Amino acid sequence: MATIKDVAALAGVSTATVSLVLNGRGQEMKVAEATQQRVLTAAKTLGYKPNTSARKLQASKAEKPTIAFYWPMDLRINYLTSILTGLRAEIEKLHFDCELLICTYHNDHLDEEQDLMDSYRYSAAIIGAPSEADMNYLQTLKTRLPIILFNRYLEKYHTVCSQDESPLRNAVNLLTAKGHMRACLFHPDSLYTVSGKRLSMLLHFAEEAGLSIERNSIFSVEDSCDGGVIAARRYLSLDHPPRAILSMSDTIAIGASSIFSRKGLVMPTDVELIAFGIGDPSLSHFANPSLSVIEMPSHEMAENCIDIARQIIQTPDFPLCHRQIPSKLILRESCPE
């Protein structure tokens, strides 16, 4: 007996699309007419008959497409607030009737997530923060499940990435324009794929602009407020610490600023600091003093991921797309214009 999976395979769509069409919700969910016809033709060709028992169980609940959002279980779990807010906001704005499932995984072990190989488990999957090993796995993965990469790029998948080059260059140029010739650098000790590239880019721009970042002024610490405390203490132990600080994490910067305040250092008079804003933007905004940040557009990137997922589900022939969302240099009290 034919199953819904068989109909989906013959029509070249997801099981969620088949369910929507066969339940008479194709028009409501804006599934293309041609796609609806393919589903109906496939069902007729296979002699598909819905499971009446299952239908009774589902009678009180309309079937919805399911979007899985994958995020690793490590310190970056702290950065989820802005992303989840963006996902939810776009779902509400689009009036997109769907289920959002949060799936955690361990970095370097994305290959253990068997549901990514089952194109019938979800309608689409958004994958955030995969490691280099995970990216290699995704490159070779053969699946019919539509996948959207959050701030990662592979040609074979839909992608939404931040564009950091201009604000990083502008931050370095701002410091040199203020007369800073030397800078200190705080960065997380666990450099992931994107953060490693971002750090290399920053060091290149600093060298290009003549902003010296000496080896003994680079502090690698845990990506946490506690790590920021350690970085600040190391900074204060220098004989002649630079007045400019670049932090690759706003969380580290918040921890560091608390120590500076306790030690009587005033920003921006005694030290000027610019951080890369990855976490909840309100934390940098309401820090004391408020932090100047290169703010990664996590909220907007999440919105774009949902928009792509919706179009994939409603239009199975939706073409592969790659979107870049620019980061912003936001100047506040820690390093004003």
Image: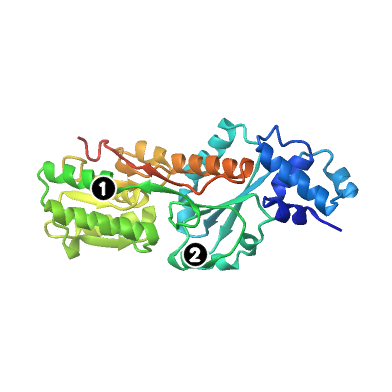
Q: Quarter holding the N terminus?
A: bottom right
Q: Quadrant of residue 10?
A: bottom right
Give the x, y percent position of residue 245.
Answer: 22, 50
Secondary structure under tag 2 reads: helix
Give the x, y percent position of residue 177.
Answer: 12, 42
The kind of residue tagged 2 is: Gln
Secondary structure under tag 1 reads: helix
The kind of residue tagged 1 is: Leu
Q: Is residue 112 above or below residue 75?
A: below
The residue carrying mark 1 is 168
Q: Quarter holding the C terminus?
A: top left
Identified at 25% across, 40% down, the residue is: 334
- Name the side, left or right, on which 99 lies relative to 292: right
Q: Is residue 20 above or below residue 9?
A: above
- Name the side, left or right, on which 215 lies relative to 33: left
The residue carrying mark 2 is 139
Of badges 1 and 2, nearer the viewer stands: 2
Are there few (<14), some (14-19), or many (20+) residues within 10 Å of tag 1? many
Mark 1 and mark 2: span between their CA atoms? 29 Å
Identified at 41% across, 49% down, the residue is: 161
Viewer-proximal residue, 282 or 44?
A: 44
